[in-house]
Image (spheres, rainbow, N blue to C red):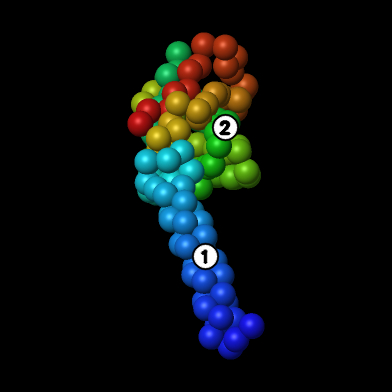
């Protein structure tokens, strides 16, 4: 065997390998096409962020001489509570808030409840826990009292 013959055989075998590699690369590229089920994933929408907001706590009372009313508010994420037009005490824990307003308490808006996500307003609940008469401090029957959260 001559050197030229050996060189020709080596080049021929490299040429066959080159064709096999090119064919495999072409198949791989076709498999990665955008129309295939394993193609690139479409862009996703960014996550929706919570929008903070305010709910108004409104009282309906059958009495005209309320001197103190205690409310409870529950919901997913209560930030804070502020009494409006009354002296008041508030306590906020995860998922629940307590509000006490004092003075000449009348029907209407008594407090603002600040929440982390106003879109979840329907998940918040409010109710009257206790009420006392202004002149005698006598506890009232709260069965006919109503508390509502208004957006």
Residue 94, relative to residue 58: is it above or below?
below
| Residue 10 seen by the camera | yes
- Name the spot of residue 126 as percent of width and height, x first: 52, 27
Q: Name the image quarter holding residue 139.
A: top right
Q: Name the image quarter holding residue 83.
A: top left
- Name the spot of residue 26 as percent of width and height, x first: 43, 56
Give the residue at mark 1. 16
Residue 114, relative to residue 21: is it above or below?
above
Q: How busy is the neighbourhood of tag 1: few (under 14 within 10 Å), some, or many (20 plus)?
A: few
> What residue lies at 48% left-to-right and 54% top-to-bottom?
28
Residue 141, relative to residue 151: is it above or below?
above
- Name the spot of residue 54 as percent of width and height, x first: 38, 40
The image quadrant where one finds the C terminus is top left
Q: Name the image quarter holding residue 117.
A: top left
- Front-most of 28 and 141? 28
Give the residue at mark 2. 74
- Front-most of 124 and 42? 42
> Of label 2 and label 1, which has the lower sequence position?
1
Real-space Cα distance between discs 2 and 1? 76 Å
């Amino acid at each position: 065997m001559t050197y030229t013959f050996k060189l020709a055989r080596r080049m021929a075998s490299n040429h066959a390998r080159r064709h096999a590699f090119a064919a495999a690369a072409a198949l791989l590229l076709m498999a990665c096409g955008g129309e295939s089920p394993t193609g690139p994933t479409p862009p996703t929408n960014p996550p929706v962020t919570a929008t903070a907001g305010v709910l108004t706590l409104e009282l309906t009372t059958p009495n005209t001489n309320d001197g103190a009313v205690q409310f409870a508010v529950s919901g997913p994420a209560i930030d804070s509570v502020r009494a409006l037009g009354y002296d008041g005490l508030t306590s906020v824990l995860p998922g629940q808030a307590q509000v006490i307003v004092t003075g000449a308490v009348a029907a209407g808006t008594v407090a603002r409840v600040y929440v982390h996500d106003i879109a979840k307003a329907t998940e918040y609940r409010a109710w009257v826990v206790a009420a006392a008469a202004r002149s005698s401090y006598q506890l009232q029957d709260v069965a006919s009292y109503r508390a509502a959260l208004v957006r």
